[in-house]
Image (cartoon, rainbow, N blue to C red):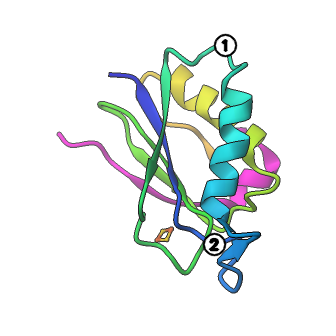
Amino acid sequence: MPDQLIVCQSCGFTADEEKRDGETGGAHLMKHLQALYEQWPRRDELALETTGCLCICEQPCAIAYVGTGKPTYLFTDLDPTTCAADLLTAAELYLDSKDGMVPRFQLPDDLQSHRTARIPPAS
Ligand code: FES
């Protein structure tokens, strides 16, 4: 099973702005991600998925990286208008790491402060 980048499609653009032009921040982010993903050479290794909620609704937008035998990473307070390319760059680091460990300093600069949690895999 490929690793996954899971986007909360219900998140707002910010904590105070749920929708713009009828679209949630999460849906907006997913649209940007899908456009980049179509040209992304590593599509076979990473599935782009959505979920209804990642239970950190007060810190939109939220996404998670999930992989078999790898820690799950939660990122929050993302700007859905600007972060899509950086999320795919971070996804490459996650794919390239056999155990899924990615040091914060290796992340794109604009993502570093948005990593909220690392949850170890089941053992
Ligand atoms: S609405 Fe996005 S985490 Fe709950």
Task: Sort mark 2 into few (<14), some (14-19) or many (20+) by Cα contacts within 10 Å.
Answer: many
Tell me the distance, in whole angstroms, between the alpha carbons under discs 2 and 1: 29 Å
Q: Residue visible at 41% across and 61% down? A: 52
Label 2: state its secondary structure.
Answer: loop
Under circle 1, the secondary element is loop
Side (left or right) of 50 relative to 24: left
Of the residues shown, which amino acid type is indicated by label 2?
Gly
Ranked by sequence position, the earlier of labels 2 and 1 is 2
- Up the image or down, 57 lies above or below 44; here it is below
Residue that appears at 75% across and 71% down? 20
Answer with the quarter of the image where residue 33 lies: top right
Residue 75 locus on image (x, y percent): 57, 57
Q: Is residue 107 visible?
A: no
Seen in the picture, residue 88 relative to 13 is either above or below; the reply is above
Residue 29 percent location from the top left of the image: 68, 52
Which residue is the site of mark 2?
Answer: 12
* CB of mark 1 near ligand 1 (< 8 Å): no
* Residue on which the image places disc 1: 41
Residue 2, position in %: x, y?
40, 23
In the image, residue 23 above or below residue 95: below
| Amino acid on which disc 1 is placed | Pro
User: What x and y, as percent, mark residue 49?
Assistant: 46, 41
Question: Tag count in the figure?
Answer: 2
Task: Tell me: residue 48, above or below residue 19.
Answer: above
